[in-house]
Amino acid sequence: MAMRQRDKGATGKETGEIFRVAGPVVTATGLRPRMYDVQFVGEEQLLGEVIQIVGEKTIIQVYEDTSGVKPGEAVLDTGAPLVVELGPGLLGSIYDGVQRPLPVLQKAMGDFILRGLKSPGLTRDKTWKFAPKVKQGQSVVPGDVVGTVQEAKNVEHRIMVPPNFRGGKVVQLKEGSFKVDEVVVQLDNGEQVKMHQTWPVRKARPVKERLMPTIPLVTGQRVLDFLFPIAKGGTAAIPGGFGTGKTVTEQQLSKWCDAQVVIYIGCGERGNEMTEVLSTFPKLIDPYTGAPLMERMSLIANTSNMPVAAREASVYTGMTLAEYYRDMGYNVALMADSTSRWAEAMREISSRLEEMPGEEGFPAYLSARLSEFYERAGRAKTLSGLEGSVSVVGAVSPSGGDFSEPVTQGTLRIVKVFWALDTALRARRHFPAINWLQSYSLYTQILEDWFRKNVNEEWPRLRSWTQRTLQEEAELEEIVRLVGADALPPDQQLTLEVARMIREIFLQQNAYHAVDTFCPPERQFKIISAIKKYSDLGQKAVKLDVPTKDVASLKSRELLTRVKYETEFDKELAKTLAQMDEEFKKLGAA
Amino acid sequence: MPTEYRTITEIAGPLIFVEKTAWVGYGELVEVGLPDGSRKRGQVLDSSKDIVVVQVFEGTAGIDRQSTVKFLGETIKLNVSRDMLGRILSGAGEPIDGGPPIVPEKRVEIIGAAINPYSREHPAEFIQTGISTIDGLNTLVRGQKLPLFSGAGLPHNEVALQIARQAKVLGSQEPFGVVFAAMGITHEEARVFMDDFERTGALRRAVLFLNLADDPAVERLITPRMALTAAEYLAYEIGMHILVIMTDMTNYAEALRQIGAAREEVPGRRGYPGYTYTDLASMYERAGRIHGRKGSITQIPIMAIPDDDWTHPIADLTGYITEGQIAVARDLHRKAIYPPIDPLPSLSRLMDAGIGKDRTREDHKQVADQLYAAYAEGKDVRGLVAIVGKEALSDRDRKMLEFADRFEQEFIRQGSEEDRTIEQTLEIGWKLLATLDEAWLTKVDRKTLEKYHPAHRSGMSGMAPKVPA
Ligand SMILES: Nc1ncnc2c1ncn2[C@@H]1O[C@H](COP(=O)(O)OP(=O)(O)OP(=O)(O)O)[C@@H](O)[C@H]1O
Ligand SMILES: [Mg+2]
């Protein structure tokens, strides 16, 4: 095999020439790059990445608008793949799909995104206080934490030996305040650990060992935690037609899930949604740590009108950030809204390459890419022996709201949790519009122990009772549709009543209500227990020939619909339960 | 002077293929000279050393292989100026009202750059349209993109015009204007818009871009971009609040499909190109507000959805990009209810930011939720009646049924010149809610109920309907 030849230009880099420009896809000649290496395209040196090599021709996807770019202009091969910078300063930031900080772009080019600007992901202006955690002469291996930086109020940033180092003895160690590109630890083999490291986005960061996900990612959303829980390190898909609540759910999870770090990828979606996050999150307080929510987040915003190639890269950029914090031993939650837009970016690029299309024009490798992506999630023992996780929640936007389309199907083959958003529920404003009959979680069994130990022994039993009741309702409704509810026996009429309570009181949760927006598991359990209690007493009452109507119109029932909104929840619930006892006693059924 | 080439090798549909050119920029503007001396404009879709593919906006009729091709060395630009207000332009931005040419204050690329998400300001200013179903239940705010989802033969144009006539921000004297982009609509429809603009004097603060049904289809791809470019200039540089009405997006999407087919691209759903989402987004996302800039762009795209099928790609992809939709419904129209806006499938996602205390009224959200829930329930009962008959209905069912009827007649229905204030809208809402038992109004909290419910307010609490025993 011939050695890779380099042009002897001043930079030591190879240069070629544009042969063809067709939208975001540029063909160049005279280059001999490796697949996925970054190229600077044209006079303005637009950022691009090699996606195909055909004989003398190199095909490059360009992350910026290519209007006006001509054949004959130069292409420069950087000889390196697309990387992101990982270090202090990621949290609280907002980036485009290739980790250019949006505030930096704004400063340089104003309110509209122009092109040709390169910017490091981490600012060089700021210094961070570095506290070493190793000693002179100590041996370190890749992944080891050499020191810490207080990045945010509640996130200690752990500076690690990069995974691609060999490791060795510490020969020089610094303490004090440093910029991200400064060296803080020197090893005896010459390797230098800086305040930041870089990593190619398309390559999964290594871990020592994968662990079973046995701990739930608590979301504070009743229908999710109670019926369809996701594990820390788990994967979930949330497909739904437009306006069914994907973004609201992703934002709810970002706000209230008990991860230490949240990476939110706005992939090909609306600019205003990013603005909403930027304007609301800093004002919200993390219920677990008391710090502003924005301080545990990093935002990747490559909106629908920004270049599609950068959109394609954005999910990998986000994933790499997530893995980096996992490597520090944190539980990280990654939100991707929407993976369908990512798939469409792949489709667009693929069609420009004139590749043979698979279903609905998507490339044949669509499902392979989806699997690779979700496989980067997981709970793991890190190289340094810590425990961390990346949980991934991907929104899917099926065309026509039809779940049989390729992106939904390709995703469902790999993820373990399916939160099915339902247009009919959304039309009734039942929010979150998650269909309780269609959705599932394959973690339910494995997480049962945790809920039993940490919330209540009865959690699994109440959970199955709830599902049974909802199932029964669906069956009874078929009958009601034919003959009317009056034809049902009283106990079944009451079941319908109880199912309605489960839906309206328990499953419905208003994201915009100051109190209801977040419901910790203990409270979830109390609400569902109260409904169960009403159901038990009610069934007793109807057996004693109390008319169902009388049971349904009890004052305590109405009170129960309102407790979830109360700031003094426990007090109000106790009052409601007492009243329930009393009212049923009057009916002779206590 | 750019070189003229006579090297067309192929002409197919709206495309021409040119070889042996100097290197040409992607997206560059092209001028084609026909044998009869006329000129057509086009744009480079694909540029390589071998061949350049040009899409001709005015269609390729009359072009032969001897026609000349000139590459103008720049991408498509529009002359913008304050003086555009009051003017009627073609779909390609040329004056067609017999007036003088537009003296440009600036020449701007029509492919707008994306607004940096970090520069955006979250839209939150309530626009009162005077239409109850919109103001009350699906509130529009400045900087929102809210399409009318309609169908053939429905009065979406009337609704759009009523919005354009009545739209105002309470307590604001800031200048506002309308930019109107017609794509493939008939002369008659365009006439309706122009007459209305003239009648109400709105024309003075409007810019019209007209690509009509008999104008070249490919031109439709640039018409809305021209319009948005003008809108951006007026909004962000002059500081006006601009309402952009774009109609009919269905015709736009069809033009897009035509180009895709001519280029032999792999089609996505129903033959529309795979990039239709991105293409539509590149226009819809030009709505918004920007920190520190005075003006705003609010978009009302209109589409007659083929066969009223919301899963059709045009409606579907639009719904995925816009911030909700207003449903112009056939069943209400059949009942002769104007405006036939069905609140149930309609949605304004930015509503919450624009309503409430200090914006509209503190009870707004709760009233809206309650009206919505009651109307939905009433409509369900309607369905039930068809099966089990009216006799089998409970008291609640009967009342809900009645509510739904009155809601349609009193809340939804209004005159095309009737400009309701938000207070009037909410009052009608409360009046209708008062026909229901208080215990059913679960979306309204006690305090709000006591303050706004007619039975409580008028000191006639004794007359409040009783909960059934
Ligand atoms: N949990 C919730 N509580 C209250 N309202 C909700 C909830 N979920 C969704 N909604 C309502 O539904 C609307 C649409 O939700 P959202 O924007 O999340 O939809 P989406 O599925 O992301 O749509 P798209 O695919 O078009 O982006 C919201 O603006 C809100 O009004
Ligand atoms: Mg969304």
Image: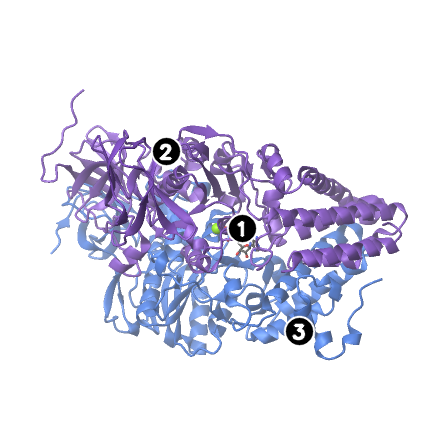
Name the mark on residue A245: 1
Residue position for label 2: A204
Q: Residue at x 74, y 40 (%)?
A: A472
Residue B171 pos. (x, y %): 47, 78
Residue position for label 3: B452
SS assignment at label 3: helix
Mark 1 burial class by Cα count in 10 Å: few <14, some 14-19, many 20+: many
Residue B461 pos. (x, y %): 76, 75
Disc 2 marks a residue whose amino acid type is Ala
Mark 2 burial class by Cα count in 10 Å: few <14, some 14-19, many 20+: some
Q: Which chain is blue?
A: B
The N terminus of chain A appears in which quarter of the rendering?
Answer: top left
Residue B156 seen from this side: no
- Determine if marks 2 and 3 fall on one subunit: no
Which one is closest to the eye, mark 2 or mark 3?
2
Q: Which callout, 2 or 1, points at the residue further toward the start of the chain?
A: 2
Discs 3, 1 touching: Cβ within 8 Å = no
Indicate whether A121 appears above or below B459: above
